[in-house]
């Protein structure tokens, strides 16, 4: 098409146009009428009856409007929604095809682009011109939307295109290249599956197959194919040597199959290529077509020099050789899908919304495999039999948090089983196809936005929502509630609107705000408090029910007392939830009275006051990352002290480590106390032991079963920061104390170990810790900036004018100014931790194993 350049000023001269407010999709009143000026690239006013008028730049040679613009035509939602923009563009094209491409039909134009501009406020949709099935070189029509109006249309389409048959027509043959691979694992059925997107060579010429294995070559006779194990989307590397090779004969219109079934290492290469291609295509077409990572080449390494495992680095995936116990993991479709799931999770996470969690990733990667195989038995063939490595549909559902161990594969089975049950429930309700599709949608929403397993329920609701209002329920909320509650992920805390109890001095409040919607939730039948003075008898009382609240108070106790308590909420359906949620340490505790510091460690900086050592010493100071069973946020400040904060969070096998303080001077005091915040994850004490020692004497250790408990042990898993008090009076005669924290482990299960914050040696005080600094804290009635009586604000920061009793209940000693419940505050901190904690960087090289 011959074009001439028109001066910019002339070409873009402003012309008034008229727009009656029509919306794209309405038919124009009349056929287009064009009045032309003369010139190499003329400017015309194009009108569609009394509906629209636009200014146009007309190509002199073709008579086609090169650009058309004006006030624009309304296209609501077109900028943010690609589908709306495409529909609007196609409607306009169909209405005005005679002007934009004379002699063509709208069916001659295929979509080639639909994308936002760099600033994100414009969307452009492009169509390429075809004629008689062939691409017209240079022929295209483009549409630009801004502020949900079509403001520019451009056409380089050629009018009245005809196609002349060439004198000598080339003939092409085509056929399919298939790979013979295990359908799931070598010991079961094998199938000839397409080699998807492989860069084969046919007669020395490169030929990339389509997803169904089709290749094309010049000529109509049979072709010799050198099959490939690399392509634009998957590339195999063989750690055990060079890539497998072959030579195949392919007849036009037929298929040929490459089989290396008798060679473990070669078969691993073919199987990994096929199954990596299958799962990548599933992710591309069913999960996220716009995820850039899916357009890159996935590196798949097979036959690596170990056995019984596989792993993802967050990008590429790796598989090990066969042994007498385990199959070559590259030959297992389920394991290929699973490891791909880890890498997909790593790249799917929406920064600032979701975050990496090892247990979540394990369970969701198992579910990705199940979505492709339609089988709850994940990893069949791993142990050289049909038995699954993990079962997402066990006879007894695994529940959060009762069945958590801190081991990511075990804990991942909770969310994996949950998602399988979601699939069953939705397919039963909606039908197999629609139910599977909705499950896939919910699955990917959780993968993108959840920060851990407990947050998966809320993100499932977001994916299921259909009107932007979660308060009125979601289409499948009843099914989701039933399933997630069965796995402990939507217990009464969520579905009945129960919030964690809050303590203010001796008063305890439990807020209950049932959510709205059509899916009924069980109401709270009662809320009971059990309390005792430490070492004394337990007393119970029910919190009084009010309007969406339960309230009550522990009787006031004298300063120096240590009170222990817990809250149990029972629902009408008989289920219950308890605070704190740790069967190995079932009572919160708080100290009554003010304290002042003798010595305190907040770990904001590494201190020479501490020494670590032992076998497998992995103590460190740093920001908690929520690894293993560790917290995601410090109790105070930003840093904590604990075992393995940054590697994978779990303490080492067969280790015996300690952290010990210097001798701390008690300054002659006989009433000193040790106050600290603890977040501990440790296996039942029959296997692993966590201990606290003072001057070499053990004062605390985790609960231990009397006999070997096997899988029924009581693991100590703190799920919040816990306040702990120790009376140091027995050590007053020594005049000093040395604190020591130990952990001794066996070769079995590893958990998060010790995490400590605000470890303080304190003594009783008559005033709040910050009294006299001029700033009113939560435990002060007043603060006038001094410690003098007679000026209206006493030395204990109490109002001298009304005679009120000052707040004498603090659970944090020298290192905290809060008067709220240790459990309630820690739960609040945990919620903030989900939002504020730093997610580990993607592609860090951390291995996510089978």
Image (cartoon, helix red, strand yellow):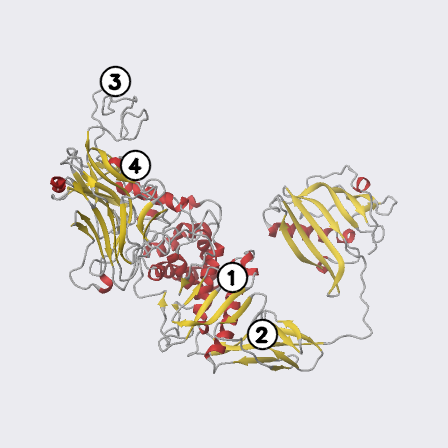
Q: Secondary structure at mark 1?
A: helix
Separation (CA) of disc 1 from disc 4: 48 Å
Residue at the disc numbered 2: 228
- Tell me where residue 406 appears, x and y as whole percent: 31, 57
Task: Reply above or below: 132 against 520.
Answer: below
Q: Is residue 570 left or right of residue 182?
A: left
Earlier sequence position, callout 2 versus callout 1: 2
Separation (CA) of disc 1 from disc 3: 69 Å
Badge 1 vs badge 4, beta-carbon distance below 8 Å: no
Residue at the disc numbered 1: 283
Q: Is residue 359 left or right of residue 761?
A: right
| Quarter of image, res 446 | bottom left
Residue 404 at least partly seen:
no
- Tell me where residue 555 appears, x and y as whole percent: 16, 35
Residue at the disc numbered 3: 792
Residue 69 at least partly seen:
yes
Q: Secondary structure at mark 4?
A: loop
Q: Secondary structure at mark 3?
A: loop
Earlier sequence position, callout 4 versus callout 3: 4
Earlier sequence position, callout 1 versus callout 3: 1
Separation (CA) of disc 2 from disc 3: 88 Å
Residue at the disc numbered 4: 547
């Amino acid at each position: 098409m011959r074009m001439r350049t028109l001066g910019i000023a002339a070409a873009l001269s402003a012309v008034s146009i008229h727009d009656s407010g029509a919306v794209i999709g309405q038919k124009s009143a009349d056929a287009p009428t064009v009045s032309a000026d003369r010139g190499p690239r003329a400017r015309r006013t194009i009108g569609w009856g009394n509906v629209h008028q636009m200014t146009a730049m007309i190509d002199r040679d073709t008579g086609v409007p090169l650009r058309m613009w004006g006030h624009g035509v309304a296209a609501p939602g077109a900028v943010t929604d690609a589908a709306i923009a495409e529909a609007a563009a196609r409607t306009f094209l169909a209405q005005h095809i005679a002007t934009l491409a004379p002699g063509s039909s709208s069916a001659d134009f295929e979509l080639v682009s639909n994308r936002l501009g760099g600033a994100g406020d414009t969307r452009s949709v492009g169509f390429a011109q075809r004629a008689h099935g062939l691409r017209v070189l240079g022929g295209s029509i483009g549409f630009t939307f801004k502020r949900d109006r079509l403001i520019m249309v451009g056409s380089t389409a050629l009018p009245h295109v005809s196609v002349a048959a060439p004198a000598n027509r080339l003939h092409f043959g085509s056929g399919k290249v298939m790979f013979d691979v295990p359908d799931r694992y070598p010991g079961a059925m094998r199938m000839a599956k397409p080699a998807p997107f492989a860069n084969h060579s046919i007669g020395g010429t490169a030929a990339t197959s389509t997803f169904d294995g089709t290749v094309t070559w010049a000529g109509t006779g049979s072709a010799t194919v050198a099959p490939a194990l690399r392509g634009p989307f998957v590339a195999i590397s063989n750690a055990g040597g060079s890539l497998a090779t072959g030579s195949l004969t392919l007849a036009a219109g037929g298929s040929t199959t490459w089989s290396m079934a008798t060679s473990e290492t070669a078969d691993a290469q073919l199987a990994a290529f096929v199954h990596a291609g299958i799962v990548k295509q599933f992710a591309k077409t069913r999960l996220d077509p716009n995820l850039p990572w899916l357009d890159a080449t996935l590196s798949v390494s097979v036959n690596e020099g170990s056995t019984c495992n596989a792993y993802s680095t967050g990008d590429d995936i790796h598989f090990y050789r066969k042994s007498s116990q385990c199959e070559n993991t590259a030959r297992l479709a389920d394991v290929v899908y699973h490891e791909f799931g880890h890498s997909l999770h790593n790249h799917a996470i929406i920064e600032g919304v979701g975050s990496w969690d090892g247990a979540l990733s394990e369970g969701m990667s198992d579910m990705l495999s199940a979505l492709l195989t339609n089988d709850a038995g994940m990893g069949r063939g791993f142990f050289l039999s049909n038995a699954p490595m993990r079962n997402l549909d066990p006879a007894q559902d695994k529940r959060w948090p009762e069945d958590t161990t801190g081991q990511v594969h075990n804990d991942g089975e909770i969310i994996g089983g949950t998602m399988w049950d979601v699939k069953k429930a939705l397919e039963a309700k909606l039908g197999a196809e629609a139910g599977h599709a909705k499950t896939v949608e919910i699955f990917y929403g959780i993968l993108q936005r959840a920060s851990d397993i407990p947050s998966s329920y809320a993100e499932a609701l977001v994916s299921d929502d259909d009107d932007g209002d979660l308060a009125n329920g979601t289409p499948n909320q009843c099914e989701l509630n039933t399933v997630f509650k069965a796995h402990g992920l939507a217990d009464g805390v969520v579905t009945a609107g129960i919030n964690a109890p809050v303590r203010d001095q001796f008063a305890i409040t439990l807020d209950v705000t049932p959510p709205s919607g059509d899916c009924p939730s069980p109401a709270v039948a009662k809320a009971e408090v059990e309390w005792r003075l430490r070492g004394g008898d337990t007393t119970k009382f029910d919190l009084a029910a009010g309007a969406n609240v339960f309230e009550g108070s522990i009787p006031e106790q004298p300063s120096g007392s240590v009170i222990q308590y817990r809250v149990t909420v029972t629902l009408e359906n008989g289920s219950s939830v308890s605070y704190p949620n740790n069967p190995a340490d079932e009572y919160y505790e708080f100290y009554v009275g003010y304290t002042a510091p003798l010595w305190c460690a907040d770990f904001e900086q590494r201190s020479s006051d501490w020494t670590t050592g032992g076998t497998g010493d992995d103590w460190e100071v740093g920001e908690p990352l929520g690894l293993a069973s560790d917290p995601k946020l410090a109790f105070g400040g930003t840093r904590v002290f604990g075992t393995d904060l940054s590697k994978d969070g779990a303490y080492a096998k067969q280790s015996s480590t300690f952290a010990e303080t210097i001798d701390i001077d008690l300054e002659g005091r006989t009433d000193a106390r040790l106050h600290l915040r603890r977040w501990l994850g440790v296996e039942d004490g029959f296997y692993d032991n966590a201990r606290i020692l003072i001057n070499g004497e053990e004062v605390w250790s985790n609960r231990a079963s009397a006999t070997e408990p096997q899988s029924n042990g009581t693991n100590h898993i703190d799920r919040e920061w816990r306040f702990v008090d120790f009376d140091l009076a027995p050590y007053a005669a020594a005049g000093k104390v040395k604190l020591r924290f130990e952990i001794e482990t066996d070769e079995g299960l590893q958990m998060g170990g010790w995490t400590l914050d605000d470890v303080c040696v304190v003594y009783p005080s008559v005033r709040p810790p910050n009294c006299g600094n001029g700033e009113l804290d939560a435990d002060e009635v007043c603060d006038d900036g001094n410690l003098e009586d007679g000026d209206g604000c006493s030395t204990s920061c109490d109002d001298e004018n009304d005679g009120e009793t000052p707040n004498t209940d603090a659970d944090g000693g020298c290192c905290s100014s809060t008067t709220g419940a240790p459990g309630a505050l820690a739960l609040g901190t945990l919620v903030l931790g989900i939002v504020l904690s730093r997610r580990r960087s993607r592609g860090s090289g951390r291995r996510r194993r089978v």
